[in-house]
Amino acid sequence: MRAVIAEGSGGPEILKVVERPVPQPKEGEILVRVRFAGVNRPDVIQRQGGYPPPPGAPDILGLEIAGEVVGSDPNANRFKAGDTVMALVAGGGYADYAVVHESNALPVPEGLSLEEAGAVPETYFTVWTNVFERGALKPGETLLVHGGSSGIGTTAIQLAEAFGAKVIATAGSPEKCEACLRLGADVAVNYREQDFVAAVKEATDGRGADVILDMVGGDYIPRNHEAAAQDGRIVQIAFLKGSKVEVDFRRLMLKRLTHTGSTLRSRSAAEKAVIAEALEAKVLPLLAEGRCKPVMDSTFALEDVAQAHARMDGGEHIGKIVLRL
Ligand SMILES: NC(=O)c1ccc[n+]([C@@H]2O[C@H](COP(=O)([O-])OP(=O)(O)OC[C@H]3O[C@@H](n4cnc5c(N)ncnc54)[C@H](OP(=O)(O)O)[C@@H]3O)[C@@H](O)[C@H]2O)c1
């Protein structure tokens, strides 16, 4: 089968399409003929050498897939051959075939194309577990989401809006801010022109945001503490501006803040299955009704994987980039 690996670390040009054997399903796993694979920022960071695959994961890139079930381990009985699924994988997504534990796959709801389904798992699992589980966002509360036009951000805006929260998004251009507003954000802040702390205070009558989803880090860490409401929860999912900062923790104590974070990829299949169950119960109906939909930026053929990564490197995209296999 065709598969994409990174030869060393560096720019998109180090991505190579190579031949690999089709993987065989192990205990509880299904074999999927991949039709679309999502491209995510963690793939770019892996290509650059900053995010090695966890032990046991293949060196083939790719964290999410959509396609048809073509085989399974005898102990996997959730899906049958021919079913269409979308699944979270710890690696191996950019390939004609991938194996995944059946509990980490979800049926593709009617109304969602396979192309869109390939853009769902990574951001929906991440947003669910970080915003709704760790951050415990409730209806009527305010979510501040940084990187509002990113794959993660566009998902967070739609889900928070669907569950009755007020949403403030930050983004780096007027076009990206417009996209956030179209998706349901109540306020969009162009962080290059406006101080997001002041904007959050203004939008919340001085109260601040109840939950903050942050992928930026760096100087955003103390500023998030400032932008948070009393008893606010800040959930860290990446550090695009760095993870080492000097912070005065008095604000955290005085406002009774919770500052937490998590990564998805290194978690066990059993832990991911718990998130999948919640998504199936609470979010698949929204996708089926069309109340949420992945925002599709662009689709590239597998052979053009370097162009797909270059598009993400350039940072002009809004929403999701996917590969067609
Ligand atoms: N912890 C986890 O489990 C987990 C899982 C998946 C993804 N992630 C992380 O989540 C982030 C988003 O992933 P994605 O796939 O959605 O990527 P993406 O679409 O490329 O989004 C990255 C976003 O970061 C923003 N950004 C970059 N540098 C910034 C800066 N200096 N200041 C403010 N904003 C900045 C960009 O917005 P502007 O263009 O507006 O600046 C862009 O929208 C990545 O960092 C990824 O590693 C974490």
Image (spheres, rainbow, N blue to C red):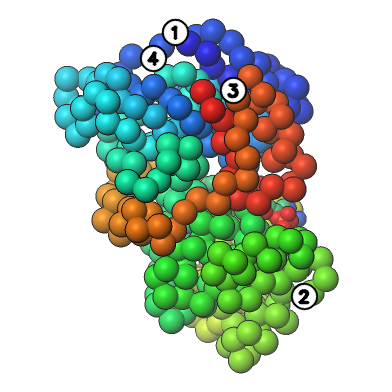
> Looking at the image, do the residues carrying marks 2 and 4 touch, with CB atoms under 8 Å apart?
no
Q: Residue furthest front?
A: 111
Q: Is residue 247 left or right of residue 261?
A: right
Q: Which residue is mark 3?
A: 302
Alpha-carbon span between mark 2 and mark 4: 49 Å
Chain-order first, disc 2 or disc 4: 4
> Looking at the image, do the residues carrying marks 1 and 2 touch, with CB atoms under 8 Å apart?
no
85 or 260: nearer the viewer: 85
Alpha-carbon span between mark 3 and mark 2: 40 Å
Q: Which residue is mark 2?
A: 195
Q: Position of residue 172 (x, y in %)?
A: 76, 61
Alpha-carbon span between mark 1 and mark 2: 52 Å
One can see residue 75 in this view: yes
Nearer the camera: disc 3 or disc 2: 3
Circle 1 Cα neighbour tier, 10 Å, few/some/many (<14 / 14–19 / ≥20): few
Q: Position of residue 241 (x, y in %)?
A: 74, 53
Q: Position of residue 39 (x, y in %)?
A: 58, 36
Alpha-carbon span between mark 4 and mark 3: 18 Å
Q: Is residue 241 left or right of residue 208?
A: right
